[in-house]
Amino acid sequence: MSDVPETWRKPPFIANPVLRYGLAVIVLGYMAWSLGTLPLDWNRIAEGMTRAGRIFSGAFPPSFARSELLIEGFLESLKIAVIATAAGILLSIPIALTAARNLAPVPVYVIGRGIIIVARSFHPVIVAIIFVKAVGFGALAGILTLVVYSVGFVAKMLAERIEEIDHGQIEAMRAAGANYLQTLIYAVFPQIMPRQIGLTIYQLDSNLRASAVVGIVGAGGIGSTLANAFGRYDYDFALAIVMVIIGAILISEAISGHVRRRIW
Amino acid sequence: MVSLDTRPEEWARFTPRQRLQRFAIFLATVAALAWSLGSIDIVWAWVFDAPQQMGDLFGRMVPPDITNIGTILRVLVETVNIATIATAIAVVLSLPIAYIAAQNTTPNRATLWLARLILVSSRSVNTIIWALLFVAIFGPGVMAGIVAITFRSLGFIGKLLGEAIEEIDRRPVEALTATGASRFKVILYAIVPQVMPTFWAVSILRWDINLRESTVLGLVGAGGIGIILQGAIDTFNWREAATVLLAILALVILGELVSAWVRRRII
Amino acid sequence: MLRITNLVKSYGSNQPVLKGLDLEVPGESMVAIIGASGAGKSTLLRCINRLVEPTSGKVELNGVTLTALKGRELRLARRRIGMIFQSFNLVDRLTVMENVQSGRLGYLSTWRAALRRYPKADIRRAFELMERVGIAHYANRRADELSGGERQRVGVVRALMQEPQILLADEPTASLDPKTSEQIMELLRSLSSEMALPVLINIHNVGEAKAYTDRIVGMRYGRIIFDGAPGDLDDVAMDEIYAGVPAEERGLPDGAPALAGQAS
């Protein structure tokens, strides 16, 4: 029998051993360092278990006594979501058109992409705080926040879809003498409509979830109700609110998924 | 033979029934919008005032005040650490949960429902709400933030991983079972390699999202740069707030670039 | 020696797929099982190593009653039964060496398996077998980089690494082109005699079955209705096995004599 090897190692993912071990060292070192430098108050954390016990016993059973407040808060969140989705979608279309490389000249494209990047980078809660400071507490701040949130997502997705469309259809329209708007309507919109509708439904669902959250910093809706309950240590009411939020999200997600599957 | 005199003079894209459907949907949408706009608690005067208010606020932010840039950057790094550690913990914890949440690998129906319950509650409760809860339990500070992000990420990663496990090719599983390998070794050799790409993609994606989430933890007291932002806003120090916002913007963009690069290298 | 006694398999209250089979396969023979689709060939094979649970009956291998084993004992017994599959059933993303070594998983400790630290003897054996079948140079390649015939060879080596007492082959050549198909059958035949290994092959290409095996078992509707030498498989027998199946689908090679009563 010819000489067969007796040892075998699987070819490593990173061929260069220096790189491989160096990376492992860096990762472990980072873990140790970050855990070490994080300001953790261990005494307070240890107390956490007893506090948790107190909170959970205070939270059960959930109290629906003030359900009118609950319903009112929930409905406000719903309205915020509806309005913000409508406005957001309407705004997203022109922004997406400016952010599509194949339709927009370079300087316009840069601005369009820039708007989208800024809209996406800030967590809606941050945006909400700023709007609250600018236009005051309440639903208006919530709507403005979610419009920005919607634009950040929908415009980006739409722009990507526009960049993928079949250019031939645009060419054909231009060759036939159509102006910019007509080309849009006949060559671009039909290709992006299905995605657009799917995005609208998805964003409505997203906005409903988000509106619950931005309320926590004062932008209206059920989030405000929740923040108040927490602030007053009404943990049983808080639990009721959270349950309603979860229920609403699940229903909304189910409807949204179902509708999107039907139209696809 | 069709006579040339019978050319149709009308054409419509949709059948009458379809037109009715489309109109009904349109009507429903308009109704929902009208109801929302009509009954919402807004002072419409303020709506028209809003652009001017925004402009006013923006004016107060320029030029950004960078006197505390050292502290800001230090806390920014802390924010990154919170996001990274929490994501790492969540990734590890979600492995067994995803395994149990997948229909083809779960031991029995009870464990399947348990895992699904954990994942759904984790996903449906927003990070901020988790943060509120953990601030009440652990007190203000980064611990609350880390646990909040971990809890939220569990549901996200667990759900996607569970779906990946359900979609694997079962044939190698059959083959390795036939060799007499134990369940664990079958998972190791037949299942793990198949879900690896999804695993990395989902983990990196969640890290990117968590980077964003961790910037706002401080606004409810759960650590990170949100605390500085809240402080600046509360003291009406808009110019410092602007610096913090710019720092956050830079962080998020950097995070996206890094995660896109890593994703390309690994997958 | 494989002995099957009165094997029955039914799904629910439907007609049983296997209706009381008796079969004996002494060592060192290559046995082909032929039959129309749905005759129960695959089920029979899988009842032997209990990938499918028999409803009743007994399966014995070299004195061990496989049907009576549970849990760990079953796993230990499965180590001695090698199986190759129509779709090769390899782990595509792993290297050929890992796939081949996965045949040893029943013998390997967990940590060695996890870290890919295979024992020297196993590595040597793997290389010997891979050279024997002609794929040694692919050891470090990913399984999905290989052609169909090469992948089936990997499957064969994986099965042989188990040091099996019997080899089960479920339509091993169905996914291969005719030339590669013959190569694999030739490989199985020579391995069978070299290693004194009984081989049980499900096959639908009757020509190959006749050319490469010592004994043919014909199944129809869950029963064995033919059991004899390839030479004894005449048109009458073929008719009985494949009755109702049109001539074109009986897996005969081109140029086979037309069956009595059939137009050419």
Image (cartoon, grey):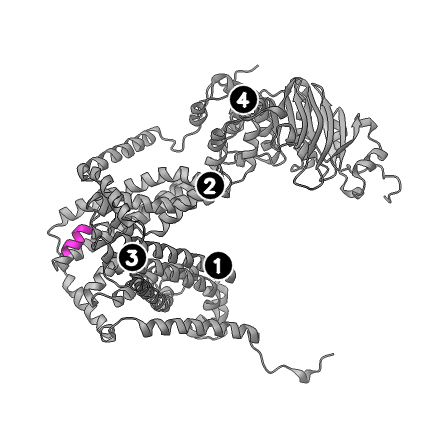
Query: Residue A115 location, x and y as percent?
Result: 30, 62
Q: Amino acid at mark 2?
A: Ala
Q: Are marks 3 and 1 in contact (CB under 8 Å)?
A: no
Q: Which mark is residue A213?
A: 3
Query: Badge 2: how crowded within 10 Å, few (<14), some, or many (20+)?
Result: few
Q: Is residue C17 left or right of residue A174?
A: right
The residue wearing badge 1 is A258
Query: Residue C188 location, x and y as percent?
Result: 66, 25
Magenta span contains residue B228: yes
Q: Which residues are magenta?
A: B226-232
Front position among marks 2 and 4: 2
Q: Residue at x 70, y 25 (%)?
A: C4
Q: Amino acid at mark 3?
A: Val
Q: Are marks 2 and 3 in contact (CB under 8 Å)?
A: no
Query: Residue A96 location, x and y as percent?
Result: 37, 64
Identify the chain of the residue marked 1, using the numbered disc in the image. A
Front position among marks 3 and 4: 3
| Element on which disc 3 rests | helix
Can residue B212 be seen here? Answer: no
Toward the bottom, the furthest residue is B5
Separation of residues labelled 4 and 1 (CA atoms): 52 Å
Q: Which mark is residue B110?
A: 2
Q: Is residue C187 left or right of residue B236?
A: right
Query: Badge 4: how crowded within 10 Å, few (<14), some, or many (20+)?
Result: many
Separation of residues labelled 3 and 1 (CA atoms): 24 Å
The residue wearing badge 4 is C126
